[in-house]
Amino acid sequence: MQKRNRISTKNLVCCALLAALSVIMARWLCFATPNGVRWSADKFPLFLAGMLFGPVLGGLTGFAADFLGSLMQFGFNPLLCPPAILYGLFGGLLRHFIRKNPNILRLGLSYLLPVVLGSILYQSAALSYFYFDGTLWAGFLYYLGTRTVQFAIMLVVEVAILFLLLKTRIFTRIIPWNPGKEEKS
């Protein structure tokens, strides 16, 4: 008989907690500037969900956080959701890379992928399509410039938070997280 992979209640509750933390950080613990740029450290819980529970639960956590957060503010738009999903997905896909030697460089390189692909490139194009009054190309360049600066700074902050959380080994009670050792599949 083949063993079925099931999502445990503990893992589901932890992912719901991380999604709620992301929503709170995105909607209430943020600083918004007049030009529409919102500074918040709301993506690292999604990446952390992927690191701890795998790409499927990480992606679902990203979707849940974006869905609930957008319903609280302006309404759900599924075309603006992929960046949040990418954070959890890449956190899960690259968790073996991070776990081998969890230093700040590996963590930063892993976190850079969803930032560039999702938050900077994809979301800049999507925002210019939906919200910019001029041409699509001018809107893309405008959002690309403002979002690149924003996410370059926030990348450093969020990677530092993740690194410090991993160094404290606080997650060993949630899931066996043994840095430097390979995970048994």
Image: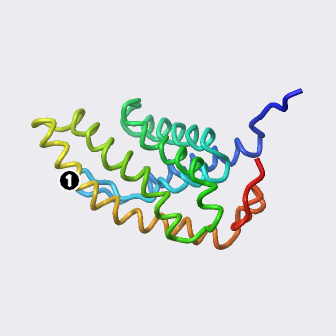
Determine which quarter of the picture holds residue 80: top left
Name the residue rendered at 30%, 46% in the picture.
Answer: 121
Residue 11 position in % (x across, y down):
72, 45
Residue 169 position in % (x across, y down):
70, 69
**Way the structure is coloured:** rainbow
63 displayed left or right of 73 = right
Name the residue rendered at 21%, 39% in the picture.
Answer: 128
**Residue at the right extreme?**
1
Residue 79 position in % (x across, y down):
37, 31
User: Mark 1 Cα within 10 Å, few/some/many (few <14, many 20+)?
Assistant: few
What type is the residue that disc 1 sits on?
A: Asn
Q: Would you place residue 6 above or below residue 24 in this image?
A: above
Mark 1 secondary-structure assignment? loop
Q: Nearer the viewer, residue 183 or 156?
A: 183
84 displayed left or right of 9 = left
Residue 3 position in % (x across, y down):
84, 32
75 displayed left or right of 13 = left
Q: Nearer the viewer, residue 184 or 144?
A: 184
Q: Nearer the viewer, residue 160 or 131?
A: 160
**Residue at the left extreme?**
134
Determine which quarter of the picture holds residue 165: bottom right
Residue at which label 1 appears: 35
Classify the position of the N terminus by image quarter. Answer: top right
Q: Nearer the viewer, residue 76 or 45?
A: 45
Name the residue rendered at 58%, 72% in the picture.
Answer: 164
**Residue at the top extreme?**
1
Name the residue rendered at 77%, 40% in the picture.
Answer: 9
Q: Would you place residue 36 above or below residue 153 in this image?
A: above
120 displayed left or right of 110 = left
Number of numbered labels in the structure image: 1
